[in-house]
Amino acid sequence: MTLALTHLTLSHFRSHKRAEITVDTRPIAIFGPNGAGKTNILEAVSLFSPGRGLRRASARDMARRPEALGWKVTGVLRSLHQLHEIEIWSDAGAARQVRIDGKPAPQTALARIARVLWLIPAMDRLWLEGAEGRRRFLDRMTLSFFPDHAEASLAYDKAMRQRNQLLKDMVRDAHWYAALERQMAETGAAIHAHRRAALDLLATAQARAETAFPTATLALQQSEGEMPATEDDLLAALADSRPRDLHAGRALIGPHRTDLYGVYAAKNVAARDCSTGEQKALLVSLILANARALAQEFGAPPLLLLDEVAAHLDATRRAALYDEICALGAQAWMTGTGPELFAELGSRAQYLEVTESNGESDTHPRA
């Protein structure tokens, strides 16, 4: 089974005034100088999954400057046994819109036909920075397995914002909180269950694989106490926490307070205490484990977006990464400053050079 973009068109997207890229299902090595527009191509591909893309940018920010006319990304997606024509666009700063096979669709519909995973340089400090980034990383992995995780998260956040407003207004009447806390309990328990199931799938995928990358042991941690596992327990905890929440002006318990804790299993060292190279290797390991698990769950390996993936990887691990990608059968879109960074791939990959002139990016297929 295959999941691959075989044709990608960018119109007024970031630095690309017009780009047409036709590829097959092999990995794509994209090279060129810094600032040429390589990552912009990966960002366009990331939009074929729900969410805000790998840069978490607004639709307005994706428009080519200075025209700001709006932008459009189209693609032909081979998903399992079907071909889909997908259009994603924004008109002059308006909200992003999606059309699948000629019909308007919500962004969440993309999760039914595609899975996209990415690793970008901003994630290299995942284990050193705040919990919010790790939750986002965890939820991207979770969403890859459970497409309805996005809807549960949106519903939870909406109910929590409304409850937080009541707290800030110092509303003490329990009747005002009942419906909101019920919604938070229902969706919060679903979020927690999805996350735990995702970690179980990742653990299984890591245990079954022979890989050159270190295994990461992952666990969920709550900033205060334990995360109530069931809907009824979370509902009771929200009610009990209301006096403290009134004082803080926000909810102090729930899945929005969860952190992801990682350990380099072979050394029994917390990921945050590992070297820069080890932290990068752990991230690569998790992305590969996620991809292997998805290949079983979804029926095909996901699209992989690996921006500047060679950074902090020595030649041996770089070659091992390419071998694992090819063995997995994933279409990986990878960037680097020069073709020598992909030498170990040889003819197993296709090559695309990106250049920049006068603020406009150009793409050139290379043999």
Image (cartoon, rainbow, N blue to C red):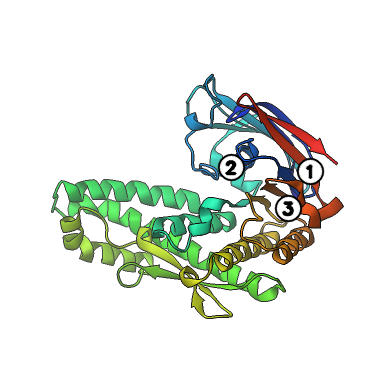
Q: Residue at x 47, y 48 (%)?
A: 151
Of the two numbered discs 1 and 3 on the same chain, state the one appearing first in sequence. Answer: 3
Up/down of 338 relative to 293, above or below: above
In the figure, residue 181 lies in which quadrant? bottom left
Question: Considering depth in this image, is 106 or 20 the residue closer to the camera?
Answer: 20
Any mark on residue 341, and which? Answer: 3
Judging by the rendered image, the residue that carries numbered circle 2 is 109
Mark 1–mark 3 Cα distance, whole angstroms, equals: 12 Å
Determine which residue is flagged by label 1: 351
Distance between the alpha carbons at the discs numbered 1 and 2 = 31 Å
**Which quadrant, please, contains the C terminus?**
top right
- Kindly report which numbered mark, 1 or 3, lies closer to the viewer in this rendering: 3
**Where does the image place residue 100, in percent across and percent down from the top left?**
65, 34
Q: Residues within 10 Å of mark 1 (few under 14, many from 20)?
A: many
Q: Position of residue 286 (x, y in %)?
A: 60, 64
Q: Quadrant of residue 144?
A: bottom right
Choose the circle earlier in sequence order: 1 or 2. Answer: 2
34 relative to 312, above or below: above
Q: Residue at x 50, y 54 (%)?
A: 149
Question: Looking at the image, which is closer to me, 169 or 35?
Answer: 35
Q: Residue at position x 25%, y 50% from top?
A: 163
